[in-house]
Image: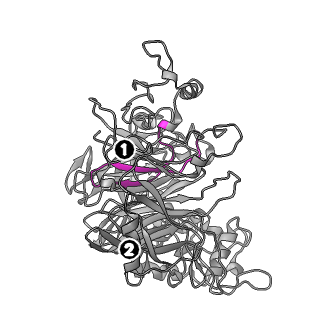
């Protein structure tokens, strides 16, 4: 469809009419306050807020100060034909999530959410094609690939000649920047990442009244050509000074040495980026005149001037990595960045000046295991020691990057590299390099060379609550705790690490960790906080799978409060007999699941990804899973206080 332009006045007229009847409606049709079960027991709880469309990842979770909740439907596959469909940028209407009752009844998984989708015909039922929410209702705002004027398609980069290079399947981060709030009227810009090669970010101008539906006023794609394009724009946050921070999740970094090899496995992606930049191959198909520089991709990118004229600025000073996310602390100086993938680092950046990420000191974490070697993920935490990697500013780093701008495919020689070599990394780590380019252009290799931990596995979203204070917590998702998380003697050889800092008997279900925000001079064990908002320890608070430390989403009980084996303490555990000797109180389907697997997988988290912390400290967890019981990915709300 073609985007229809509306005046603000007309949009408000539409919203006033549409807002009628949009008070919070739960999945079972009840209105207003949730009807959770009464409980005397305390402790953390886990409730299921939403289920997504079949085949889709939950992305783009963002909560505005006014309590409006956005999240996206990435790569849905409603027909299960293996063909991804356009992603959906959307949000919840009819709900201020800041007012979400703590004991809201969990939305239930679709009845067809099993291997045969209910009736055995292998076809998803209608409820698998819907986003279901416990309260309010999901509103698609725009689909990826929608034509938005001037032959532009939402979230789709195109060449200077007008060729569209990707499909609008992969929306990720959402960041909302308000224009004004006039009474109940909320107007602003919704920035959305598109996780493609080359990458993209869109900006949708929206307005709403109260908790009513969002009306689209206009939409456009952000132009990244002035910074040589962007690459796999993943999760992100909005800075304390209201600028979106998009993360370049550059999975190609370990293959930088072959970036200009015409036979490189990922060459199609690089050449698509070359086309976006307007580069052309010669008659033999070789890019010999101009070619993308790998050291220009893999950074945190700030969108400055987001309201008047959004302008991307790549912050080289935060290091080059497979960035999943960056979050800036309330001091406006300290930032933490996570990296997706296998054998990655966890980084801290301390800016020289508040509100300016262009210059500062970069650190990498060394994880010191606290708990049994080979222990269960729920029993193992880590102290964090921060190792300084280097200090620089964007301008200096850009001068090092520019030295590789003229490298093309014509320069590739089999068995050699046109880029930074292992020998250069070793000289730098020994203190014999002329400059610090290794620290900022090959950050993961630099961190490992200095003894920091490069064994983190699928480290996803990291976040804090708005206006967090010393003593609050940051939360981070580890989507899987296998491979490099395992002790060397348990892992495949390709995942061995010489240091073997992390030795956990992990698996594929994932963990959410929390990290206290320490004030300068405060101590945690043997560590002392070097500055405000320092992180000194990670501890698991939500683990998934058969050894989960908490479960939720029980069909009868919104707060089972299980603290050991999943559901064993729940009075509605389908594996238990009632006083009358009836197993599972008639819940034969779930009883069968327990008999076969020993637990109900749908009542635990699976592959946590996006993390958002509510103003009251509750943690919203979005999934990216294909594990059994999570065919429809879920959105959970974890309450650390119960």
Nearer the camera: disc 1 or disc 2: 2
- Quadrant housing residue 116: top right
Name the residue nearer the viewer: 368 or 617.
617
Name the residue nearer the viewer: 504 or 278.
278
Q: Is residue 426 visible?
A: no
> Please, is residue 294 above or below residue 18 in the view?
below
User: Which residue appears farthest toward the top when viewing the image?
Assistant: 580
User: Which residue appears farthest toward the left when viewing the image?
Assistant: 521
The quadrant the N terminus occupies is: bottom right
Q: Is residue 85 left or right of residue 606?
A: right
Identify the secondary structure beneath mark 2: helix
Which residue does the image show at 51% across and 61% down from the upper left? 445
Q: Which residues are magenta?
A: 603-629
Q: How many marks?
A: 2
> Please, is residue 358 above or below residue 283 in the view?
above
x and y percent of residue 99 in the render? 29, 52
Which residue does the image show at 31% across and 70% down from the upper left? 185
Numbered badge on residue 13 = 2
Which comes before the other along the chain, label 1 or label 2? 2
- Quadrant housing residue 194: bottom right
CB under 8 Å between discs 1 and 2:
no
The answer to if 624 sits in the magenta stretch is: yes
Name the residue nearer the viewer: 289 or 469.
469
> Please, is residue 625 above or below residue 16 in the view?
above
The answer to if 497 sits in the magenta stretch is: no
x and y percent of residue 612 in the render? 38, 55
> Please, is residue 600 above or below residue 405 in the view?
above
Colouring of the image: one colour
Residue wearing tag 1: 638
x and y percent of residue 202 in the render? 49, 74
Which residue does the image show at 30% across and 56% down from the upper left? 465
């Amino acid at each position: 469809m073609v985007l229809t332009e509306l005046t603000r006045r007309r949009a408000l007229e539409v919203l006033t009419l549409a807002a009628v009847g949009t008070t919070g409606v739960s999945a079972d049709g009840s209105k207003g306050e949730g009807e959770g079960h009464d409980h005397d027991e305390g402790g953390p709880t886990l409730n299921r807020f939403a289920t997504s469309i079949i085949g889709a990842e939950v992305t783009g979770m963002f909560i505005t100060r006014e309590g409006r909740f956005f999240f996206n439907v990435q790569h849905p596959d409603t027909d299960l034909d293996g063909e991804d469909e356009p992603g959906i940028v959307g949000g919840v209407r009819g709900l201020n999530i800041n007012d979400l009752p703590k004991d809201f009844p969990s939305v239930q998984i679709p009845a067809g959410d099993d291997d045969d989708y209910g009736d055995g015909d292998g076809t998803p039922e209608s409820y698998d094609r819907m986003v279901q929410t416990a309260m309010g209702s999901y509103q698609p705002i725009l689909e990826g690939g929608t034509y938005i004027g001037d032959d532009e398609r939402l979230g789709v980069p195109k060449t200077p000649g007008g060729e569209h290079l990707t499909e609008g399947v992969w929306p990720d981060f959402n960041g909302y920047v308000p224009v004004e709030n006039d009474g109940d009227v909320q107007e602003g810009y919704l920035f959305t990442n598109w996780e493609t090669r080359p990458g993209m970010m869109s900006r949708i101008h929206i307005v709403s009244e109260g908790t009513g539906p969002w009306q689209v006023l206009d939409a456009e794609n952000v132009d990244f050509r002035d910074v040589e394009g962007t690459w796999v724009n993943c999760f992100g946050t909005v800075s304390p000074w209201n600028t979106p921070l998009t993360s370049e999740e550059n999975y190609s970094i370990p293959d930088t040495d072959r970036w200009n090899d015409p036979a490189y496995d990922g060459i199609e992606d690089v050449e698509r980026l070359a086309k976006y930049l307007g580069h052309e191959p010669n008659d033999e198909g070789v890019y010999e005149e101009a070619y993308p520089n790998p050291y220009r991709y893999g950074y945190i990118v700030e969108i400055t001037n987001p309201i008047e004229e959004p302008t991307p600025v790549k912050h080289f000073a935060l290091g080059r990595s497979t960035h999943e996310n960056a979050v800036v602390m309330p001091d406006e100086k300290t930032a933490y960045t996570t990296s997706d993938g296998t054998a990655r680092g966890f980084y801290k950046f301390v800016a020289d000046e508040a509100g300016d990420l262009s210059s500062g000191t970069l650190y990498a974490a060394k994880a010191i295991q606290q708990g049994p070697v080979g222990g269960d993920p729920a029993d193992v935490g880590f102290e964090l020691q921060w190792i300084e990697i280097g200090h620089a500013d964007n301008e200096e780093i850009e001068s090092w990057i520019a030295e590789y701008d003229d490298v093309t495919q014509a320069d590739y020689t089999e068995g050699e590299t046109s880029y930074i070599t292992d020998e250069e990394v070793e000289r730098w780590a020994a203190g014999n390099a002329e400059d610090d380019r290794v620290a900022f252009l090959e950050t993961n290799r630099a961190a490992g060379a200095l003894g920091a931990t490069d064994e983190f596995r699928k480290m996803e979203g990291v976040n804090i609550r708005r206006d967090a204070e010393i003593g609050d917590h940051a939360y981070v998702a580890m989507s899987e705790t296998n491979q490099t998380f395992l002790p060397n003697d348990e892992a495949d050889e390709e995942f061995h690490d010489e240091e073997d800092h992390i030795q956990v008997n992990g698996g594929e279900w994932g963990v959410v960790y929390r990290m206290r925000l320490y004030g300068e001079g405060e101590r945690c064990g043997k560590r002392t906080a070097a500055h405000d908002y320092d992180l000194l320890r990670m501890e698991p608070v939500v683990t998934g799978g058969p050894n989960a430390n908490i479960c939720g989403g029980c069909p009868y009980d919104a707060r089972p409060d299980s603290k050991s084996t999943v559901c064993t303490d729940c009075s509605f555990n389908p594996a238990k007999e009632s006083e009358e000797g009836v197993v599972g109180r008639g819940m034969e389907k779930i009883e069968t699941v327990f008999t076969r697997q020993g637990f109900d997988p749908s009542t635990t988290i699976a592959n946590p990804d996006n993390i958002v912390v509510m103003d009251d400290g509750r943690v919203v967890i979005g999934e990216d899973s294909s594990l059994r019981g999570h065919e429809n990915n879920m959105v959970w709300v974890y309450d650390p206080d119960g």
